[in-house]
């Protein structure tokens, strides 16, 4: 598929860059990382590869710019779902649901940022995610939850939600549960209950503990 040659007017180089990122994002969605090449983006945009290199010095830079632009939308989603929820534990739960749902909607971008070759940009993004969850844990602490360590509790939460996403996106789609929304809510509930129940002290689980929590 090729279109007419895209020419950015003077002072509109940013517009062409956004168009290239839109195309790159679609290539990732359709065919994964292997489908995203400088030549493929140039062909679909109707420009020559050197025109793409004016904005992205390498395929690696293009891939990460594409992924990180998608990830910027994650924080907007997380803020949206927790707005207006007065109960900090419920807000944390909704945050976890939104995070898992995001990862399942953008499997290629998620794998490249979280599991692919690290760059400074992706490291900063991972750190931003961790700090976001730690802030949510702090809200729970301020509300009276017996959280011994905000950092450790945030790590447990991040491990749980990241694991919930990774478990599916590294499998073929036909191996996914038929109801991914239900999967996300149950995984998020497990993450929050597990992290907060052990936030005060770690203990060896027993059947009596489980029955007592019902």
Image (cartoon, rainbow, N blue to C red):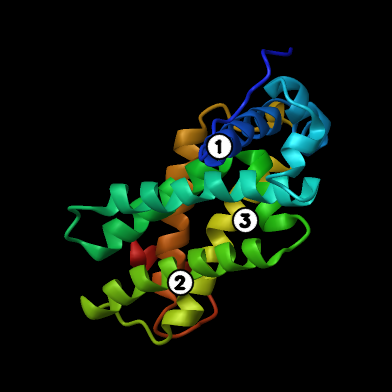
* Residue 117, position as x, y percentages in the image: 78, 59
Q: Residues within 10 Å of mark 2 (few under 14, many from 20)?
A: some
Q: Which mark is residue 131?
A: 2
Which residue lies under the disc numbered 1? 18
Q: Secondary structure at mark 2?
A: helix
The quadrant where residue 198 appears: bottom left
Which residue lies under the disc numbered 3? 163
Q: Secondary structure at mark 3?
A: helix
Does residue 31 lie above or below 196 as drawn?
above
The residue under the point 62% across, 26% down is 7
Q: Which quadrant holds the C terminus?
A: bottom left
Q: Residues within 10 Å of mark 3 (few under 14, many from 20)?
A: some
Q: Which quadrant holds the N terminus?
A: top right
Disc with the residue nearer the chain's start (2 vs 1)? 1
The quadrant where residue 59 appears: top right
Q: Tell me the CA gap for discs 1 and 3.
A: 32 Å
Query: Residue at the front extreme?
Result: 10
The residue under the point 76% across, 43% down is 53
């Amino acid at each position: 598929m090729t279109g007419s040659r895209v020419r950015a007017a003077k002072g509109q180089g940013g517009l062409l860059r956004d168009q290239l990122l839109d195309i790159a994002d679609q290539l990732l969605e359709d065919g994964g990382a292997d489908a995203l090449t400088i030549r493929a983006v140039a062909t679909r945009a109707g420009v020559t590869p050197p025109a793409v290199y004016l904005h992205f010095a390498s395929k690696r830079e293009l891939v990460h710019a594409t992924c990180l632009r998608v990830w910027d939308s994650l924080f907007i989603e997380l803020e949206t779902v927790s707005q207006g929820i007065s109960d900090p534990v419920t807000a944390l739960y909704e945050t976890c649901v939104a995070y898992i749902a995001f990862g399942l909607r953008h499997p290629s971008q998620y794998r490249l940022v979280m599991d692919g070759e690290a760059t400074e940009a992706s490291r900063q993004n991972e750190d931003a995610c961790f700090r976001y969850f730690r802030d949510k844990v702090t809200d729970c602490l301020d509300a009276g939850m017996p959280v011994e360590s905000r950092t450790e509790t945030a790590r447990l939460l991040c491990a749980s939600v990241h694991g919930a996403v990774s478990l599916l996106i590294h499998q073929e789609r036909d191996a996914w549960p038929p109801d991914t929304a239900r999967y996300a809510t149950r995984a998020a509930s497990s993450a929050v209950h597990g992290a907060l129940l052990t936030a005060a002290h770690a203990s060896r689980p027993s059947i009596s503990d489980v029955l007592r929590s019902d």
